[in-house]
Amino acid sequence: MKNSKALSLLLTANIISGFAQGISMLAIPWYFAAVLHKPSWFGYLYACTTFISLFWSLYAGTLIDRYSRKKIFILISLGGGVVLLSAALTGYLMGSVPLFMVMLVFLATVCSFNIHYPALYAFGQEVSRAEHYGKVNAYLEIQGQATSILSGALGALLLQGVHAGAGINMLGIEIKMPLELRGWKLHEIFLMDAITYFIAMVFISGISYVPQTHKIIEEGSVWKRIMSGVSFLKKNTSVFIFGNASYSIFVVLMVEVYLLLPMYVSGHLAAGADVYASAEIYYAIGALLSGMFIRKIFGGTNAVHSILLMMGATTVIFFVVSFTKMNALFFAFSFLIGITNAGTRILRVTWLFHRIPNGMIGRTGSVFSMLNIFMRFLFITLFSMPFFSAGSHVTWAYFICGNFVLLSALLLLKNYREMVST
């Protein structure tokens, strides 16, 4: 496959920065839930960040279609590194990171996600031939989830620390640690994350490639470019419906991982950071296996049918954890939603690649992202109410999420024939 070296360099950069980034994004929600004992504060922070993302994601889509994706990756790494380094140095000088700096890091990281991942998939489409779209999307998923497994495992140790000879719950298994490991402070984690951003920037700078798709760069104002993406989706209603309905698992996953997960573990399961991180690892293992095998499993089935099956499975597992209180079942939930979310994402993006030109992929993606973020904002605002963080009431949030995926699946089913024939 052409441009394999360019993809390898980008994946290497993602692994390096994503490893420490995963630990930071694991540490911040846990910091609010288990250290400050203010999970609702994080909910409000997440809601505000999501609201800002509504507008940023639209603008980000125009940048992805207008400018070099390589330059975008470099600027993201530089900006993220500067913010994290500033927070880390402030923490070293003051003894701890001020709350406003923790919020700034979270905001910067989420805004980075909103342009990095759409640009990553757009780059994958740009450097690949149509027959390789599925393979490239699977590679991106495998890389991301393998990194999540490593960052989740190390994050469990760094957040909690462990005494020599003491045990730590890793993946539901009690592991005796032969060495003493103190828990890292937040500014130490941020410093490690900042360093990896700068290293990733060096790798990205060495990327060179030959585009495999013809990208038409549209001039004009930002608003004009945004409306071009909207107009494309108006003319292709099946693409619009599919792109949004198939995004539902990702909507609830983002709410679950950053808001509900720490509340479920600390409030409902009454467990510690090791169980919290283990759930993240189980999710990543499921997503990794999905990246490796999903195309083989559903190779003889159309993408829409396959996604409907995974949405049905997601609905069931959300309902199960809503009415149970077992670590093992929650680990099974995390593993299965890793499979369904990653599998849906691979098939969804591949389906869209075949129907949306590369020069339009950023702007149409920003429309999907905006609606996705809006739904997340509604859920985050709702679930940040004190009711959901009291005792085991968080289980009602899981029940609501399951119903949302079910309704999205019914919308997809209603338009099934039109999507299959598109």
Image (cartoon, rainbow, N blue to C red):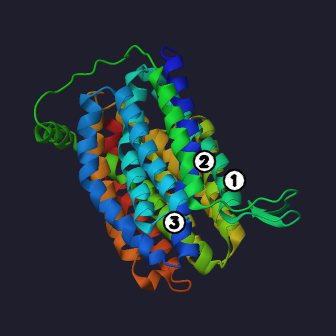
Q: CA distance from mark 2 to mark 1?
A: 8 Å
Q: CA distance from mark 2 to mark 3?
A: 16 Å
Q: Nearer the viewer, residue 409 or 125?
A: 125
Q: Which residue is mark 1?
A: 153
Q: 89 left or right of 243?
A: right
Label 3 close to label 1 by CB (< 8 Å) = no
* Mark nearer the N terminus (2 vs 1): 2
| Residue 205 image position (x, y, % from top left) | 45, 23
Label 2 close to label 1 by CB (< 8 Å) = no
Image height of 32 relative to 297, above or below = below
| Residue 101 image position (x, y, % from top left) | 42, 61
Label 2 close to label 3 by CB (< 8 Å) = no
Indicate the amino acid at tag 3. Pro
Indicate the amino acid at tag 1. Ala
Q: CA distance from mark 3 to mark 1?
A: 16 Å
Q: Which residue is mark 2?
A: 148
Q: Which residue is mark 3?
A: 29
Q: Nearer the viewer, residue 19 or 99?
A: 99
Residue at the (42%, 42%) spot, across then down:
348
